[in-house]
């Protein structure tokens, strides 16, 4: 990375400098990913009743924010260079980008073999993938500058790189934000779950239903269920837990099951 920064300065290439900055962020993101994964494996203790599972979500959000800020900074500098392009050494840019792309492919293959359903791992993967796009764009820009002398190709390539970074940042920020705000997990509709529980034999009313995600792949649910006065609360609770696990993949559930009163105190939904 230090060598690429030096070569970028010598070549007056924003595209190369963007690649170097992105690689630095990638290295930090990978380190953060490993650290967060280790924290997430720690058992629950003391005040941390779910352990540190959301460390992975915080790491994913940090990756998204970093991609967003770095992409915005590149856009600003690229616009400035489009107005007043410097003298770019295209041959040096092309050679450096090709070497960087080869190194990036090796790292990308390693991360691609991990569990990408994990937001933390997915964040690192997106970092490396956008870095590969960056090297490809930089190599093309270097070739154009070298063969045609069109120096604005360098900031144009930088804008394309920034675009890929911003596109990778948004899904990470959206997904990690949804988990932190305790929204329903992707693919799980609270209304459908409530309807399924309410249609179960013996159930009169379902309310205060909450579905959220502790961490990637760890959904949780809580609800208050009212059953008929002659029904077996414990049997129905076990049946509802089985339905939630088999149909919706929710294993961590907290169901408060009570007999209904003569008159419902909650509006029926």
Image (cartoon, grey):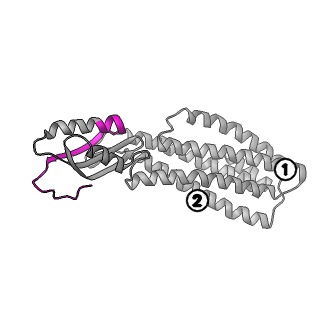
> Which percent across, then down, holds residue 125?
57, 42
From the viewer's perspective, tell me whether residue 150 is left or right of residue 107: right
The structure residue drawn at horizontal position 44% and vertical position 40%, both measured from the top left corner, is: 37
Query: Quarter of the image holding residue 13?
Result: bottom right
Local crowd size for mark 1, using a 10 Å CA cut-off: few (<14), some (14–19), many (≥20): some
Q: Is residue 97 above or below residue 265?
A: above
From the viewer's perspective, tell me whether residue 63 is left or right of residue 165: left
> Which percent across, then down, holds residue 131?
65, 46
The structure residue drawn at horizontal position 63% and vertical position 43%, both measured from the top left corner, is: 129
Which quadrant of the rendered structure holds the C terminus?
bottom left
Q: Residue tagged by mark 1?
A: 144
Local crowd size for mark 2, using a 10 Å CA cut-off: few (<14), some (14–19), many (≥20): some
The structure residue drawn at horizontal position 78% and vertical position 64%, both measured from the top left corner, is: 82
Magenta span of residues: 243-269
**Label 2 SS:** helix
> Which percent across, then down, holds residue 29?
54, 46
From the viewer's perspective, tell me whether residue 7 is left or right of residue 180: right
Q: Are marks 1 and 2 in contact (CB under 8 Å)?
A: no
Instruction: Identify which residue, 151 or 223, lies in the foreground.
Output: 223
Q: Which mark is residue 120?
A: none
The structure residue drawn at horizontal position 28% and vertical position 51%, both measured from the top left corner, is: 209
> Which percent across, then down, holds residue 230?
10, 42
Q: Residue furthest right?
A: 148
Instruction: Identify which residue, 220 or 121, lies in the foreground.
Output: 220
| CA–CA distance in space, label 1 to label 2 | 28 Å
From the viewer's perspective, tell me whether residue 12 is left or right of residue 46: right
Of callouts 1 and 2, which one flags the residue occurring earlier in the amino acid sequence?
A: 2
Query: Quarter of the image holding residue 215?
Result: top left
Query: Quarter of the image holding residue 107?
Result: top right
Whether residue 246 is in magenta: the answer is: yes
Q: Is residue 263 above or below residue 203?
A: below
Q: Residue tagged by mark 2?
A: 69
């Amino acid at each position: 990375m230090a060598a690429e920064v030096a070569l970028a300065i010598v070549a007056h290439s924003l595209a190369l400098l963007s690649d170097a900055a992105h690689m630095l962020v990638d290295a930090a993101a990978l380190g953060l990913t490993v650290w967060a994964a280790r924290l997430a494996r720690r058992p629950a203790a003391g005040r941390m009743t779910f352990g540190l599972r959301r460390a992975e979500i915080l790491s994913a959000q940090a990756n998204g924010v970093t991609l967003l800020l770095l992409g915005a900074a590149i856009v600003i500098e690229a616009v400035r260079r489009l107005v007043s392009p410097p003298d770019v050494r295209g041959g040096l840019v092309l050679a450096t980008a090709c070497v960087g792309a080869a190194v990036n492919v090796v790292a990308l293959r390693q991360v691609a073999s991990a569990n990408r359903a994990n937001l933390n791992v997915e964040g690192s993967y997106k970092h490396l993938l956008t870095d590969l796009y960056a090297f490809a764009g930089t190599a093309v820009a270097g070739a154009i500058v070298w063969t045609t002398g069109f120096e604005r190709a360098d900031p144009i390539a930088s804008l394309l790189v920034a675009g890929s970074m911003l596109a990778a940042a948004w899904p990470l920020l959206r997904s990690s934000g949804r988990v932190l705000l305790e929204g329903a997990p992707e693919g799980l509709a609270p209304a459908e779950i409530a309807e399924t529980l309410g249609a179960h034999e013996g159930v009169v009313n379902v309310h205060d239903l909450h579905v959220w995600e502790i961490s990637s792949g760890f959904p949780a649910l809580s609800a208050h269920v009212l059953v008929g006065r002659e029904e077996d609360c414990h049997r129905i609770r076990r049946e509802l837990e089985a339905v939630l696990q088999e149909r919706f993949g929710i294993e961590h559930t907290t169901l408060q099951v009570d007999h209904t009163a003569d008159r419902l105190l909650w509006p029926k939904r």
